[in-house]
Amino acid sequence: MRGYAARRLLVALALIWVVVTFVFLAIHLVPGDPAELLLSQGGVAPDPGAVAELRQKLGLDRPILARYVEYVAGILHGDLGVSLRDEHSVADEIRLRLPRTLELIGVAAVLALVFGLPAGTWAALRAGGHADRALSVLSGIFLSVPVFVLGTIAILVFAQKLRWVSAGGFVAFERDPLQHLMLLAMPAGTIAVGLSAIVFRMTRSSVLEVLGRDYVRAAQAKGLTPRRIVLHHVVRTALIPVVTVLALHLGSLLGGTVLVEFVFNWPGLSGYLVSAVEARDYPEVIGIVLVISVLFVLLNLLVDLLYAVLDPRVRHG
Amino acid sequence: MARRAMSRLLVPAAIVGAIIAVALTVSLLPLPDPVKMSVATRLAPPGLAHPLGLDEYGRDVLSRILWGARASLSVAFLAAAVAGVIGTILGLLGGYLRGLVEIVTVRSAEAVLCFPPLLLALLVVTLMGPGAATLIVALSILYAPGYARVAYAQTLAVSALDYVVAQEALGARPGRILLRTILPNVAPPLLVQFSLTVAAAMVLESGLSFLGLGVVPPAPSWGLMIRGARSTMEQAPLLLLWPCLALTGTIVALNVLCDRLRDVLDPRAGTASAGFLGRGIARILPGVVDPATRPALLDVRGLTIEIATSDGSFRPVRDVSLSVAPGETLALVGESGSGKTLTGLAVLGLLPTGIRATKGRILFTGRDGRTRDLACLPEPALRQLRGDEIAMVFQDPGTSLNPVHRVLDQVAETIRAHRPATGPDAVAQAVGLLKEVGLPDPDRRGRSFPFELSGGQRQRAMIASAVANGPRMLIADEPTTALDVTIQAQILDLFARLRGRGSDTGLVFITHNLAVVAEIADRVAVMYAGEIVEEGPVGAVFGEPRHPYTAALIASVPDGREGRLESIAGTVPPPHAELPGCRFAPRCGLAAPECSAEAPPLRDIAPSRASRCLHWRDVA
Amino acid sequence: MIPSVSRRSLLAGAAALPFLRIAAARARTPGVLTFGLSSYPPSIQPWANTGTAAGTIKLAIYRGLLSYDAKGVLRGELAESWAAEGTTAWVFKLRNATFHNGDPVTSADVKWTIEQIADPKSSAYFRAEMQGVERVETPDDRTVRFVMKQPSATLPLWMASYHLPIMSRKSTSAQPIGAGPFVLKAQERGVAIELEAFPKYYKPGLPKLKGVRAVAYADENLRVAALQAGDVDLIEYVPWQSMEVISKDPKLNLDTVDGPFMYLVFNASKPPFNDARVRKAVGHAIKREEIVKAAFFGRGSPLAHLPIAEASAFFNAELKDGWNYDPALAKKLLAETGHPNGFSSGLLSTAQYGMHKDTAEIVQQNLAAVGVNLELNLPDWATRVALGNKGQFDLGVMGTATDSNDPDALANLIDDSLSPSYVRSFGLKAPRISALLKAGRAEFDAAKRKAIYKEMETLAIAEAPIVGLAWRSQGYATRKEVTGFKNLPGALTFHSGITLEEASVG
């Protein structure tokens, strides 16, 4: 067991290293010069001397290998560097923004489970019926409406017409908890729409499969109520693949909520990543990707743990 | 079932086919040029010349939607297909060969998952320049790991299966095993993955176009159209509707198609039963039972079971009658497919969806002395009897115990379903029961999960669960078939011991093993092709069979002295081929013309003996 | 009946609940204006160009020697008066003003500022210009004398730019100390910047506001929604498609000027665009109304000459249609240069900004009509800039605003003596234009300057160093309660932040 854990950790570290190296090379390979860009804001021609000075100041004139070695050494010391744009600490900024994105994803996941699980179970129990078909079509719609359309409509309805919430934005929880939650609701809800459709589809097929298992019939033979059979015997087992798929999707949402963050002006990690790429702010891009891949690895570990909780065969096997 | 699934496949397949056909033939359709601008008439509302109106550059929206189908679909399908091929290969190799290959293929694919999808797309697009080809590359990279994961997990599961192991033992080449054996088995989940991927690719295409990373204008794509329409949402909201509608419609059609396709490829998933939710009552019959014909415990009369299919219905069980007295053991014997298991399930009202008892009565006398017809008892009333007065032991304890719950809890839950016992009480009782069925160290072993027990121990637990509430009627469906020979004997001993308690529990023992019958049963009923062909006390039937099938069965039992197995010539007729005469006639040595003329009834031939053979006297 | 009544009142209560909460949520601090920015400033270093959003913040917290009034006329700011001494010296008299740290603004601070900008290690926008300052003399605390290496008529324009604020010599890069009407109070990076009124601001009674909260809304639709919903009081970069709705909204004001413009740049280092006639042909092939209509929803006007505004004293009415739409002429010019059937080439733009993409689509369509088939290349902005700077393009769409309304600001776009830049044509040879620009910069007489620039524009129409496409409307929108904020005319629109000191919110 310990050997397995050690090997896993090693593979995970190698994975992160590969990712960081790849991103480091790729982002440097991509055309665009951060110094030039910073001084070219608004379609203005910068002074070439100023650009050269800035390049030197930012260390962009040094060979890429030297910068790579220095960067990796920095990581090993827990230093993610500073932004090329304003010398702001990358680690500080990630510390600030990561919780916001995690919050967004977390709430969306909870919402998706709250709606997707019961709906998926229900549809599976009535497979082939009208309700099942209606839900399947609905899930298709949920899957296919682009979030930026959904978000724009949500803003139009809830912020502009009904005036229930502000038109996007972010207020820190400690500053105004209520406002924070209300501003959170719309983007989280928008993500949850697509996510709940995924949960729905997975749950439905998983429950259908479990319903055909012998132990479900055995449970019926015991005279258990349908409620107990569904909750205790069917859903419990059917959850296992649902959890895996959901976790994978949550992983891809780390840094993948960019459109929602954009449409709702939610200052999370994804928007930060995109603005960093657009500005070719190398330390920021690599720092964010590093953090995301570490999180992804952790998420995978968490899924394995969850697996063990849900499936005793894994726990004891 | 498969044919029905096929026909259900038609409609979504036709829709998806039509969409693809439009995408392919759009250049032949009499449509306006999708890139021809007419800025002067921009945002014109729908009209005769332009059914869906004009967009922000005055281009025909209908034409752009149809042309856009080509771009959006080809990107989505190609990306999903390329990703599917690459991912499946990686997953198959990793899952089958394991070791270093696994690290190189599956784990390296996972590195991609570490990337935020958008960053990956952003990097690929920035490096390669925007465009449809870039988009396909980016999306393929993005989606391949998903396939790899699914294929990997599925391959792991499949390659442990008996038939794969058997092929390996026979020396089949790995390539052949992968292609011929494993690939078809991992295909269904991959198809689902494909449908999800195509949908996701189309949505992502629109998202990337929104960010300017997608298809290059002025070529139309749905994503670009949505992006363009969003800025003119207030002036022309319909412009947003059309591409969204096209996207949604296509994705819904694709989802339905892939779901149905999976049903065809993997019928198991589609036929799952949810019958317990609200089993329709097959027939409304008077529930009152004539006191004069009151049976001792269980009295099945003229039971007929029908399976409805799209090709009409057939009857796997016909006119079956049998009765069990308190304390009596009846063995129900027959080859597989003879309908004995369905008969057992019918008694408990557990027939799978689509299979119904259409004729006959199942009279059961409960503890309260009242006799009920189980065939027309409503589900809640039936549920109260199940597990309490009538219990069942299933064939495979490995699959009939829920893998995620402790054995003890599964026994205790039977008690709690019918008795007002508290949790700890029920557990204490369950421990007692497990001890009674001979599970060693029941206190500790009871807390195990099913997979931690041996087959025999599991079956003991199943039996403990079945007898937990002291049922009046126990139906055991091949309870020893899945077990080793030595364990079989122990379990039979257990049944004998449970019966020997002096209880008045009636037992129906379903089996194909005549040796077992001789050991355990008082009476035996022999089933062939859905009918009971002979019935009587075990000694009498085995000593003097009065039906050629029974005689043949007895003869086929390997005899230690002769060491020779005499198999019955011919095969059991398929259940849906109902012959006019005796169903055994085609295989019968005694068959005469009259045998095929009319189906012979089950007739009493002696006190407590019955046979369906016209020539029972001639059976040696 | 009782249950129905109670249910109805319950419903009423439930419906009212969100509104009550909104009232609490939207409670605004009186006197604080919420400004919806188009992006979060990457940094607010005083002298570097970091974009127009940063410019607005800089105009609120820093002050230069000069600035513009609401009509766009040069006025004194930290300097109460200024005058040229001959052609190579300028003298500025400082007024009694105070830095945010309480120190008075002195000539030593001005000298220090200029030295910082001209420092070889500086990355300031006016680095080259300030390196053209021979020396800064400080005869007394209130007098600054610039001695230039060459005659410079345009020095006052530079001094009015938001890239050239005067900073206290006690400033550090982490702690810049300016003398503007507002003080930087807090920064929530990526989200909002909070400014507070500076009580010792040198203009009595100003600023009228107690503070400004600048919130970044990158999505233009959301920026408008936030204004309509009352979340913000003032937004910049009003998207063109929303101008109609906003101008009709009785609760909102729209203030637009035609200031920035779209134009085409060429790779003149290789055929076919090394030939001025081909460039001119392109200029005659464009239906500019279509660009105004499709890319800017009619909010703008065609630009068929150099970007000199009609209101400018340097506007030449007879050159107004220099590159008018004339496909026959375009074809003729193409035929003359050996392209009777047109040619194929590439058009570089960016998909990151809608106006660049939209303009490119129309240009592509228009040029196809005269046989020039362009393949669009729409990478992200950073790549587009890099490709432009390296000359890896044939034809490019650009959009910008000049630094000021003075024609000297055009040098940035057409002066072939400047280093290669994505805002200019690549590898262009137009020495006569550069010479005229240089002459204009050294000329102090207004009438002579006008003549020089007229000649320059005439030449430019023929040589087409760039091709003008369209003026685009640049808009600010406010709630009716906001008064005093003004969109400055023409190219000065991005200087509008200067009027924040006059703004008040009712």
Image (tube, coloured by chain):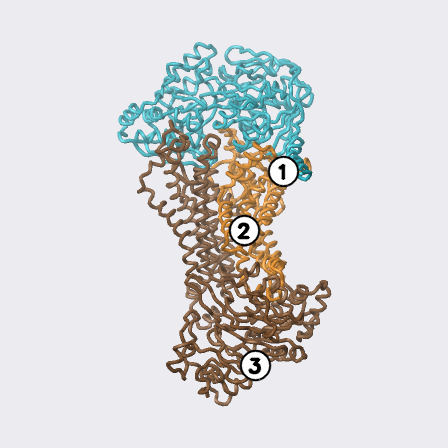
Between C95 and B564, the one lying in front of the other is B564
On the image, the x and y values in percent for residue A50 come to 52, 29
Q: Colour of chain A?
A: orange
Structural distance between the alpha carbons of marks 3 and 2? 51 Å
State how far apart marks 1 and 3 are (Cα): 73 Å
Q: Is residue B163 left or right of residue A115?
A: left
Q: Mark 3 or mark 2, which is nearer to you? A: 3
Question: Disc 2 versus disc 1: distance between alpha carbons?
Answer: 25 Å
Mark in front: 2 vs 1: 2
Tell me which amino acid carries mark 2. Answer: Phe
Chain on which label 3 sits = B
Mark 3 vs mark 2: tell me if same chain: no
**Label total for image:** 3
Q: Colour of chain C?
A: cyan
Tell me the crowding category of disc 2: few under 14, some 14 to 19, or many 20 or more residues within 10 angstroms, Cα based.
many
The mark found on residue B523 in the picture is: 3
Quadrant housing residue A229: bottom right
Badge number at residue A200: 2
